[in-house]
Amino acid sequence: MKVLVVDDEPLVRRSLEKALVHRGHQVVQAADGRAGMDVWISEKPDLIFLDILMPGLSGLQVLKELGPRKTGKVVLMSAYSGVHGQETVQQMGADLFVAKPFDDILEVVKKAEGLIA
């Protein structure tokens, strides 16, 4: 499966990439919302990990700008988890929300894989 990780924190991108590659996935990364949107359009990933708060375009702005061009399943991520219930996340055009920092990154990856299965 092709996975895109969009986050302005290099440690988050590297950690997710390591866990995803370990599980047999191909991973592409982007360090901000604008680059993430460009990679999303060109690569058409099956699964996208998308940080909500980033400089430039936020994850929510990326979802809004992509609109009907959105492909794949979207996992929104944020350290500010209190305001993002699952219903709110789906209204924003995503499929799952995970809070950072991750308690168990392999569990996060397994939940995300479940969106595709």
Image (tube, rainbow, N blue to C red):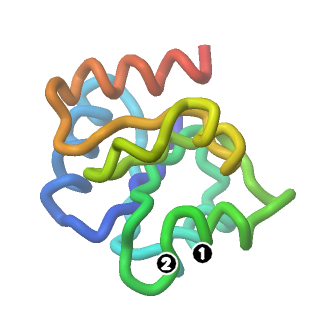
**Residue furthest bottom in the image:** 56
Disc on res. 38: 1
Q: Any mark on residue 107, and which?
A: none
Q: Is residue 85 above or below residue 113?
A: below
Residue at image coords 40%, 75%? 32
Report the amino acid beneath label 1: Asp
Residue shown at the point (37%, 82%) measured from the top left = 55
Q: Amino acid at mark 2?
A: Ala
How packed mark 1 is, by other alpha carbons closer than 10 Å (few <14, some 14-19, many 20 or more), is some
Q: Classify the position of the C terminus by image quarter.
A: top right
Q: Badge 2, how many Cα within 10 Å: few under 14, some, many 20+? A: some
Q: Quadrant of residue 37?
A: bottom right
Q: Nearer the viewer, residue 62 or 110?
A: 62
Q: Which residue is mark 2?
A: 35
Q: Is residue 44 left or right of residue 81?
A: right
Residues at discs 1 and 2 in contact (Cβ within 8 Å): yes
